Image (cartoon, helix red, strand yellow):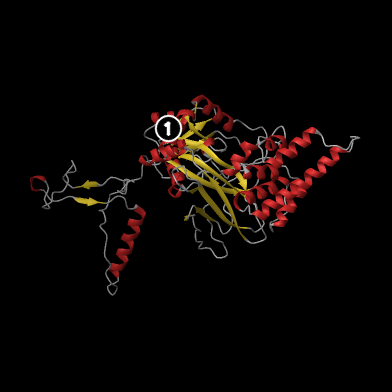
Amino acid sequence: VKVELVLNMVMSFRVSDLQMLLGFVGRSKSGLKHELVTRALQLVQFDCSPEVFKKIKELYETRYAKKSSEAAQPQPQQHRSPEALSIHSAYERGSSVARTSLSTPNIDYPALYGKYLNGLGRLPPKVVKPEVRLVKLPFYTTLDELLKPTELVPQNNEKLQESPCIFALTPRQVELIRNSRYFSPGVSFLCRICYTDTSAPQEDQYPPNIAVKVNHSYCSVPGYYPSNKPGVEPKRPCRPINLTHLMYLSAATNRITVTWGNYGKSYSVGLYLVRQMTSAELLQRLKTIGIKHPELCKALVKEKLRLDPDSEIATTGVRVSLICPLVKMRLSVPCRAETCAHLQCFDAVFYLQMNEKKPTWMCPVCDKPAPYDQLIIDGLLSKILTECEDADEIEYLVDGSWCPIRAEKERSCSPQCPILVLGSSDVNGLLPTPNGNGENGKATADVVDLTLDSSSSEEEEEEDEEEDDDDDGPQPKRRCSYEKGLVSAC
């Protein structure tokens, strides 16, 4: 009851009272009112010494005395109002009536206290402020939000700060985590940290000198990737931190302490109970809700190839490969992002598997963001893949139709011109036999390679004749030349 009463006193303080209280214990007095309230409530929860309680009581009585004197001024008899008397007497008796009388109409202080007791302190409903939002993670489905993104407030001017949070899991949450141990992946308890920026959903971002302690053990945080380039600082993959294995899965309270470096930037932390998804589950969900009708895809092709009156170049078609740019294999589930300007697709199966291991969500075709919620399956290209099995590329035409583009067969290394078999008495052109004799004991016919150019052959003959006349010259190796009267078939 004493703690509840002190919390309600603090919640009724003005900014000047809060600053005096925080200055009394040597903590930072700068910031907005809700930040001062958060620090004061943390002070009551964790460091409420008798001196601090005496100071809170003194500030409250001083504020109440001013308020009662102001309310008594219009009255001629200079007496307090009955309501003020009842509040003051109730406070002196330590009754719960003081808690009800001090509350403003729109604030439920017992419920608010319960949140702060569990370390889930939030702003009073009366204070309107945009909340920090974190980007959705495709491989995690949020079951419970134990702590919305809450700013890490420095308590002093030191560079290394600590922000504690105390809470207890509900029996349902404990049961979910215990039952999921028999499945992989299962239910996990995640801590996510990001910049305190309300303009757009924020990516996970760690502050300097980050360390997360769960109860009595430190949790592992991803390290830095070394950089081989000179002058480039190593990067750290900022991902959610899994705290499940260090949690007390019972009615006991859990204490999480985030240690961080205070170097000017503001960070927020959130705690979530999530169910982890696999790439196969995401693929099945995409096939259920992400298929784009073939007619819509055909209309998109026509739109891409529509004649632009301002352009001097007319596009009559566009080629699309049926090979996935990720793994150089034939597409099975053609996929692309709706935000992409190209018609080329990649394979959804391999794209999801790669992002499951290392989430980047970048299009392999145009190298632009391709998040999961923007992915679509091309219904037209899926239909083409079933109809065109003997081609690796197609071409879309202006009217939305398509035609396969088959690769030309590689030219053979064998001679293009035929090999003629010549013989003086063999009119049928019998081929020579391995033993050197033709059929019926005839002499072996001469085989002439007609792939050689006739002009080059004649030049060689002339050179050979000149060399024969020169007895002193060396005798080079001679190629097989054909007899007089024969011409090339090329």
Q: Residue at x 57, y 37 (%)?
A: 339
**Label 1: how many residues lie within 10 Å, few (<14), some (14-19) or many (20+)?**
few
Q: Residue at x 30, y 68 (%)?
A: 467
Count of picture labels: 1
Q: Residue at x 51, y 54 (%)?
A: 213
The image position of residue 210, as x and y in percent, is 55, 56
Camera-side residue of 243 and 324: 243
Q: Is residue 463 visible?
A: yes
The residue positioned farthest toward the bottom in the image shown = 472
The image position of residue 322, as x and y in percent, is 43, 37
Q: Amino acid at mark 1?
A: Gln
In what quadrant of the picture does the N terminus appear? top right
Is 54 placed left or right of 476 in the picture? right
The image position of residue 18, as x and y in percent, is 73, 49
Q: Is residue 135 visible?
A: no
SS label for mark 1: helix
Q: Residue at x 40, y 40 (%)?
A: 178
As drawn, 167 above or below 290:
below
Is 425 placed left or right of 392 in the picture? left
Q: Which residue is mark 1?
A: 284
Camera-side residue of 109 and 400: 109
The image position of residue 452, as x and y in percent, is 32, 53
As drawn, 193 above or below 140:
below
Camera-side residue of 408 and 487: 408
The residue positioned farthest toward the top in the image shown = 295
Q: Which image quadrant is residue 66 in? A: top right
Is 36 placed left or right of 135 in the picture? right
